[in-house]
């Protein structure tokens, strides 16, 4: 490089500041990706827990029914409707009549379609997570891992910059440290930019409309299983309510046990609307964090929130301080 | 097709009130229990129906809330009606 084109200290500082401020947006992009995958984990885990709870409730409801009525048989009791024969209480003893219906026993297969939607979403979030959590490429270590390499770099740099006598003098420890840290900073920024590029590739390949549909579907899946949960809890509550008057007033222990179970089921049913709101919020949060993440991935720093602008500025300041603190030592090397 | 969720929920509430009132009357409480099971089954399967069904169910629901558990004949008629409507949903 001719001396004519060499950057002065203040000019280099300005160029560094401009470069570093642009790169700080990548840091926020990565942060938003992390926030989104966290929201995704919360939402999908919540739906999985709901489905496991529904299956457990369904199992208990069937057991309660068979325990309440000797005519009922596992695994799918036949509930009588309309006229019943003598001795038939809740379940039909004989052959199925027109309006009779079977209670559903929920198995793994019943949750298959819901799980398929969740698995599809999780595959995308895992891909994003793999990029933001992968081990960074250590550029500094690669370049300056050994004394010989470092000296060779210095020698080459000396040649390139037209220093008299070709090779630079052997670097001092301070200068080695300065070169190492500057390369490390450069490595961090290159690595971050590469991750953001990889994240963009995923977004470009993904069908955004199908993804939005899947998030809406997650909402409907929650609503569907909440309805089933409500039905199972209510069936159990009905059986306890039916059973309680049949327990003798003298049998305090027996009545106490049924009343306690009745209260538990009442409380569980009362809690369902709040659970519905909480689940809807997890999906809303997922939708919003993806939208924020996607927007900034393809947009620029004007999309940053005030708080993010402050954090980006802090990142830039830290990096600038790191770069400038070594500027004098680096300049001597060159 | 109209969403029947609201009427079915209010009907279920009325049936629970009735279940508490019929108490230890085995035959009646069994029939109410079966009706509640049916309502829950419909609710779980996102019950949809025509507006005529809704009107009939609302009427049956209002009547059932007033029902005197001792009036067995009225009870039978109402339940026949309710079960008939629900069978078509």
Image: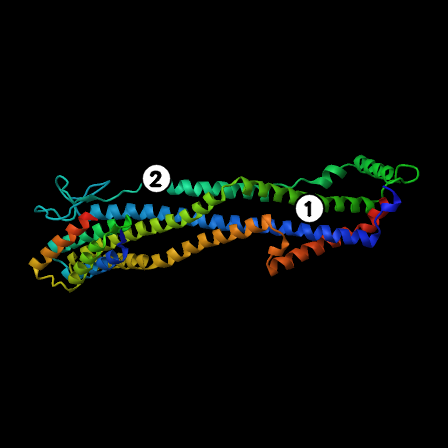
Locate residue A271 relative to residue A15 in the image: left or right.
Answer: left
Image location of residue A167, percent across then percent down: 88, 37
The residue under label 2 is A108
- Please report, as a chain letter, where disc 2 is located: A
Q: Give the secondary structure at mark 1.
A: helix
| Residue in view at x 20 percent, y 55 percent | B52
Quadrant showing the C terminus of chain A: top right
Image location of residue A43, percent across then percent down: 45, 50
How far is the residue under mark 1 from the one under mark 2? 46 Å
Discs 1 and 2 share one subunit: yes
User: How is the protein colored in the picture?
Assistant: rainbow
| Residue in view at x 62 percent, y 42 percent | A197
Q: Is residue B26 visible?
A: no
| Residue in view at x 60 percent, y 41 percent | A198
The residue under label 1 is A189
Q: Is residue A102 visible?
A: yes
Q: Give the secondary structure at mark 2.
A: helix
Q: Residue lying at the far right in this picture: please name it.
A: A165
User: Callout 2 environment at 10 Å: few (<14), some (14 to 19), or many (20+)?
Assistant: few
**Residue A268 vertical position relative to residue A179 in the rendered view, above or below:** below
Image location of residue A292, percent across then percent down: 54, 53
Image location of residue B22, percent across then percent down: 14, 60
Return the disc, 1 or 2, that comes first in the chain's sequence.
2
A121 and A132: which one is in front? A121
User: Callout 1 environment at 10 Å: few (<14), some (14 to 19), or many (20+)?
Assistant: some
Quarter-of-image position of residue B55: bottom left
A245 and A57: which one is in front? A57
Locate residue B63 relative to residue A169 in the image: left or right.
Answer: left
């Amino acid at each position: 490089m001719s001396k004519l084109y060499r950057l002065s200290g203040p000019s280099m500082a300005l160029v560094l500041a401009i470069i570093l401020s642009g790169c700080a947006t990548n840091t926020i992009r990565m942060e938003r990706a992390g926030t989104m995958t966290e929201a995704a984990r919360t939402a999908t885990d919540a739906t999985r827990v709901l489905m496991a709870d529904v299956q457990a409730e369904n199992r208990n409801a069937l057991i309660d029914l068979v325990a309440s009525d000797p005519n009922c048989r596992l695994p799918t009791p036949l509930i009588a409707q309309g006229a019943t024969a003598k001795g038939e209480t809740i379940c039909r003893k004989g052959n199925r009549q027109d309006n009779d219906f079977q209670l559903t026993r929920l198995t793994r297969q019943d949750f298959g379609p819901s799980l398929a939607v969740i698995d599809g979403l999780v595959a995308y979030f895992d891909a994003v997570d793999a990029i933001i959590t992968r081990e960074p490429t250590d550029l500094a270590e690669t370049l300056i891992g050994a004394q010989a390499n470092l000296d060779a770099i210095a020698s080459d740099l000396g040649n390139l910059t037209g220093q008299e006598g070709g090779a630079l003098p052997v670097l001092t420890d301070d200068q080695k440290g300065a070169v190492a840290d500057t390369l490390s900073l450069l490595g961090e920024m290159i690595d971050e930019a590469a991750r953001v590029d990889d994240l963009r590739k995923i977004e470009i390949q993904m069908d955004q409309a199908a993804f939005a549909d899947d998030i809406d579907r997650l909402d409907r899946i929650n609503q569907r299983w909440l309805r089933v949960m409500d039905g199972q809890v209510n069936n159990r509550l009905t059986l306890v309510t039916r059973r309680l008057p049949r327990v003798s007033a003298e049998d305090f222990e027996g009545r106490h046990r049924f009343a306690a179970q009745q209260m538990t089921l009442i409380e569980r049913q009362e809690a369902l609307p709040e659970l519905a709101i909480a689940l809807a919020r997890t999906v809303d949060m997922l939708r919003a964090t993806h939208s924020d993440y996607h927007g900034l991935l393809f947009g620029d720093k004007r999309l940053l929130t005030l708080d993010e602008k402050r954090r980006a500025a802090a990142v830039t300041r830290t990096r600038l301080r790191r770069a400038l603190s070594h500027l004098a030592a680096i300049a001597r090397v060159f | 097709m109209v969403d029947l969720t609201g009427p079915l929920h209010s009907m279920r509430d009325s049936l629970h009130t009735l279940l508490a009132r019929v108490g230890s009357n085995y035959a009646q409480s069994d029939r109410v229990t079966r009706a509640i099971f049916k309502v829950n089954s419909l609710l779980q399967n996102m019950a949809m129906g025509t507006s005529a069904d809704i009107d009939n169910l609302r009427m049956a629901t209002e009547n059932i809330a007033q029902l005197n558990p001792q009036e067995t004949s009225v009870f039978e008629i109402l339940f026949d009606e309710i079960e008939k409507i629900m069978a078509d949903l």
